[in-house]
Image (spheres, coloured by chain):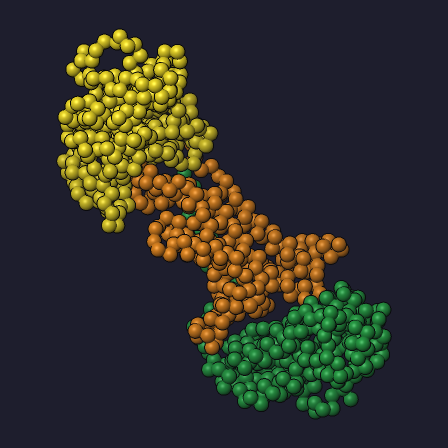
Amino acid sequence: MRRGILIGIAWIVAVLLAGCGTAPSAGGPSASASAASAAPAEKSLILATTTSTQDSGLLDELLPVFTRESGWQVKTVAVGSGQAIELGRRGEADALLVHSPEAEEKFVAEGSAGARRLVMHNDFVLLGPKADPAGVRGTSSADAMKKIANAEAVFVSRGDESGTHAKEKGLWSQAGVTPGGSWYQSTGQGMGATLRVAGEKAGYTLSDRATYLTQRDSLELEVLSEGDPGLLNVYHVIEMTQKAGGRVRADGAKAFADWMVAPATQRLIGEFGRAKFGQPLFTPDAGKDEAKLGE
Amino acid sequence: MRAGDRELLSVPELDVASGRTLAVLGPNGAGKSTLLRALGLLSSHRVSGVILLDGRPATRPLMRHAITAVLQRPILRRGTVAANVISGLRFRGMSRREARLRAWPWMEALGLVPFADRDIRSLSIGEAQRVSITRALAVGPKVLLLDEPFTGLDSTTRADLIADLRAALSGQPTATILVTHDRQEALALAEDTALLIGGRIRQHGPTTEVLDHPSDADTARLLGYTNLLPPALTGRTHPLVARPEHTHLILDPSDGPAGQRDDDVRPVPGTLRRTVALGIATRVDVDTAGGPLTCLHPGDLPGTSLPPVGGDVRVRVRQARALAGVDGNGWTAGLGSRPSAS
Amino acid sequence: MDVLFDGFVDAVELLLSGDEDSWTIIALTLRVSLTATAIALLVGLPLGAIVALARFPGRRVLLAAANTGMGMPPVVVGLFVTVLLWRSGPLGGLGLLYTPTAMIVAQAAIATPVVIALVAAALQQVDPDFRVQMQALGANRVRAFAALLGEARLPLFAGTMAAFGAVVSEVGAAQMVGGNLVGQTRVLTTAAVLATSRGQFSLAIAFGLILLLIAFGVNLSLTLVQQQRAVPR
């Protein structure tokens, strides 16, 4: 009996030791994480970005390079553009990489954000089932939205206040349609999940090209409408300042933003995806005139 | 002894010598278990007063070393019979091998050797209680506390266990305190008996004396003197009490007159309410002017020899005891009630 | 069905290839879940024992709260912890958000009510007079309590396993307070979710299978201890 108790105690101790013991073996990240609390001078910044940059794999490619070159650790929080901007507003993120231009401009006008710079774009594509019940193939985006609404064909929306969702709402208003009814379905999830819902329901949806390309093989969706200037998906990097919160790392934000628009980084962005998909997923745009994109 | 503001128990003095057994006899809820736990310093309630062990005030460590207890339910630890029997010795720091050597004679005395390696989950309740008792004895305690250990056992198991315990205890220097509601257990095991009712000791003395001399209505009921005869019925100055076994219907009109023995009472008239055949005895309930009486006749009374229900009968009461401390008025509350669970 | 088979193949490959990223994820998963379980035990065992054995006002309310806590969605716990750890939150100065420590805190918060409730249930199912009986055999209070723990060993271990299962399999809180950072706070569950949203289904299933394997390994070792003979001859 007593041995049983001893074993029980030994188990608890062992668990504790396991917990402590693996700490060093988990390597640098945890060490730096615990150091973060002790020394605020430690170089770590929080990047709030959209799910598309993470789901496409772009950040996995870029961030290790940035960390190597600058010494800054980046903690990525991949959420919708709406939540990303909200995190910035509360000072819970240092830099934003988002694609919801109207909301961004409003946000920057509030004054807590610093510089906002153009980084890159990709474009949105209107996807639908091969059968195309609403007959939108090859039409302009506004016409396509109208036809979908008239046919009451299933349309799957992100519904998460992301940049993609904002873009979709813009298209509906261009088309003069207020979507609603059982054909209009909102997932409230990221792009990848929304694509799969659309695929399973044989519905239409709006997606950024990058996410679509990375998942194309597992989807029964085709590009039905593309190339329209209204379908551009433009990414900006926004630096936060201490006006948003006393703990914002403005120096890290600036380092990250500067690095994102640097020529070498822009080349990396331009190359990303070319090997795998035969075409780049993003077009680097740093320094360009935003009004002339897509021309 | 108190729980919050409530007084649970108040006992002026109680002592038991080594080698002797004291029974604390009381009805359910009298505070017997509370008293036992207070004596063993096992209680979570507030205890005021002194507990002396060998004449010295007992501390918890001293007491822990001196006592073992057997509770009403056998609480055994997961494992084998042998492991349980030695657990008291193990708590005292003995090695497993030594504990087994020390416990073995007790296992033999209580007949547990064939069970030694049995898992306790396969034991009957009687066997489990036997293990619990052996476990307490194996320590060779200065004081053994028994909290109604035989309650809930069938009569054969109980009789065997009582006999084995009595045999095991004889010659041991252990002071034993048995708490029970059963006067037969007190008679079988204890030289001395204290009656505990309502948290107070009512009587204390040699068992045979205490069991045979109730002092008031409560102790009378506890001791089996459940027939209460008010002075109006008997013409005596004090109320009388008697056991049902000593209370009989007068079936033969020519039955001799009263007064053959000192403690006999003149026959009491009443009406027969019902008769119940109990196999080894026949119970006859009679209503009298002073309340109901229960008669217990040995054997099977043939129905023909009994008067009809509602008929007039006379009841003879033998070996009645006078409640000297009680006058004729103060005890009628107890009249109509049945004997308590004892 | 191909996806399931591919997932199985991927899982085997990940484990055999010694892929550093995967092993980092596995190590972090184990470290976070086991530490959180241990903390939950350290906190929950005394609290559960008090709730089970002591008599005080509010005891039942506490027990009901613990039982409710068992059903609390991890993502809600994650949200609480996130708000607490926000830079603008009361503990923001610690800079713990998006670290394994934050995940351990959140998961310990998830597991503690489980431990409290199951420890209380385990101890209450032992005879209420058990400790009195042990003391009446010569055990001091500590040993009597230890004997009680030994007596309730089976359900106590079951409670430990339930707590571990609750934390190792949850994704909401881990995602929210950890942020799913590569090499830092990515655990098997969040990795599986990410792989799913990237359309890498077989990889996601591989992570799921590895998670299953880990949970099985931990539970197997706990079960082996649990089922040992209670009283050696």
Q: Residue at x 38, y 27 (%)?
A: B153
User: Where's the N terminus of chain A, which quadrant?
Assistant: top left
Q: Residue C129, how many percent across, how many down?
A: 35, 40
Q: Residue at x 57, y 79 (%)?
A: A86
- Chain orange in the figure, letter: C
Q: Residue C87, how many percent across, how many down?
A: 48, 76
Q: Is residue C208 above or below residue A69?
A: above
Q: Is residue C226 above or below residue C73?
A: above
Total marks shown come to 0
- Residue B229 in sight from this viewpoint: yes
Q: Residue C6, how many percent across, how many down?
A: 73, 56
Which quadrant of the structure image shows residue A253? bottom right
- Residue B202 in sight from this viewpoint: no
In the image, B299 versus C193, the foreground residue is B299
Q: Residue at x 69, y 83 (%)?
A: A234
Picture colour for chain B: yellow
Q: Residue A26, how many percent across, how many down?
A: 53, 62
- Chain green in the figure, letter: A
Q: Residue furthest front?
A: B311
User: Where's the C terminus of chain A, which quadrant?
Assistant: bottom right
Q: Is residue B9 above or below residue A149?
A: above
In the image, A69 versus A272, the foreground residue is A272
In the displayed structure, does residue B169 sit left or right of residue A209? left
In the displayed structure, does residue A266 sit left or right of residue A91? right
In the image, B315 versus B218, the foreground residue is B315
In the displayed structure, does residue A179 sit left or right of residue B20? right
Q: Residue at x 25, y 35 (%)?
A: B333
